[in-house]
Image (cartoon, helix red, strand yellow):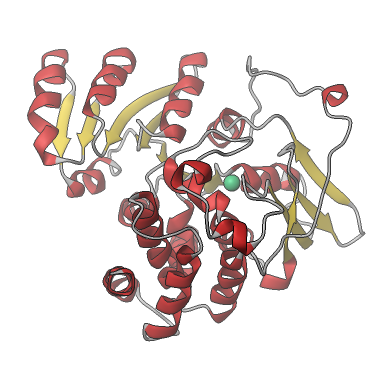
Amino acid sequence: MKKIAILGSTGSIGTQALEVIKQHQDKFEATVLTAQNSSELLIKQSIEFKPNTVVIGNDDKYQEVFDALDPLGIKVFAGKNALNHVVQYDEIDVVLTALVGYSGLKPTITAIEAGKNIALANKETLVVAGGLITELAQQKGVNIYPVDSEHSAIFQCLVGEFHNKIEKIILTASGGPFRGKDRDFLSRVSKQDALKHPNWDMGAKITIDSASMMNKGLEVIEAKWLFGLKSDQIEVVVHPQSIVHSMVQFEDASIKAQLGLPDMRIPIQFALSYPDRIKSDFPRFNFADYPSLTFEKPDLETFRNLQLAYDAMEKGGNHPCILNAANEIAVQEFLKEKIGFLEISEVVEKCLDKLPFISEPALEDFVDTDKETRIKALEIIN
Ligand code: MG
């Protein structure tokens, strides 16, 4: 029985992880569930899955959650520091990090320090501090299993190949709802337009990131750290059908790909069941339903974010951290309809220009950079 802590159990990845656990109750147990605000869903999940402990991030909701779950013998904690406490529990085997954005960084570090394997859905953690995290994981003998569908695809292609050199990887991108559009069109799109993803049903932050191609930019940086690659070994190709989830090219010119319907439960389950594959009842892909799978070059001039992410990755230091924090604020303000869609990359670019560069940041430098970037991004917007 694998005992799992799900950080962010009420979000899109968290709820799908619980579907996986429900299908395999003989193999997995949800030992810790956490949510930031969604107390009602957290209570409902806890009644069904009977975790040992829950954490509600928002202190104002503690009493409500406590009153509902304490009578069931479930421990209830509130506040940010509680996450750092529960990921260290002796009985936890895997911590699934499904928090949104930078908030995942500290609990992930604490979990790795406590020797817990990580199922990583929170890509921002690796974007911000990939060098630090991967080094720490190596020191502690901790495995990081990717949950992101593209990185899971690459990981699946690498099973049995870990001793073989990767020539390059090819990350697929759906292109999002604005694929093929020009900047004039993008200057007029609304929040509702950006929230309509053609293939994947995901949380708001990642859906906007997909529309702006920042998601692919973050994934490029995530891949660098997960698979130890240089930037010229990471290629992006737009594949609107989202069936080929990514590819690895080896030194003999052979390419391996992983395919399937766009269903996040597949990579979530693999991250939890690795090295085994376990039977699922998820819908199967049928080649006859997709007579044409197409591939095209990404448009880096219209979708500036992808280029900015490549540049930040090459520059290194705290630049990916600035990129991420500026983007989090820009997306937040776009969702509040304070800025237009194209301004997202403008804010990111201005922050990268204006904040001081640190070539070899320590954890405190990342914390400071994140904080200062958020302030600067809001200044630029207001
Ligand atoms: Mg992805």
Of the pair 216 and 213, the residue shown nearer to us: 213
Q: Quadrant of the N terminus?
A: top left
Which residue appears at 90% of the width and 53% of the height?
Answer: 254
Residue 130, visible in the rendered structure: no
Q: How many marks?
A: 0
x and y percent of residue 361 in the render? 39, 79
x and y percent of residue 73 in the render? 15, 17
Of the pair 382 and 46, the residue shown nearer to us: 382
Which residue appears at 65% of the width and 46% of the height?
Answer: 150
Of the pair 100 and 238, the residue shown nearer to us: 238
Q: For residue 355, what is the image quadrant?
A: bottom left
Of the pair 255 and 206, the residue shown nearer to us: 206
Which residue appears at 30% of the width and 31% of the height?
Answer: 32
* 138 over 190 or under it: above or below: below
Residue 294, visible in the rendered structure: yes
x and y percent of residue 323 in the render? 45, 69
* 222 over 118 or under it: above or below: below
User: Image check: 328 left or right of 58?
Assistant: right
Q: For residue 15, what is the image quadrant?
A: top left
User: Image check: 180 left or right of 144?
Assistant: right
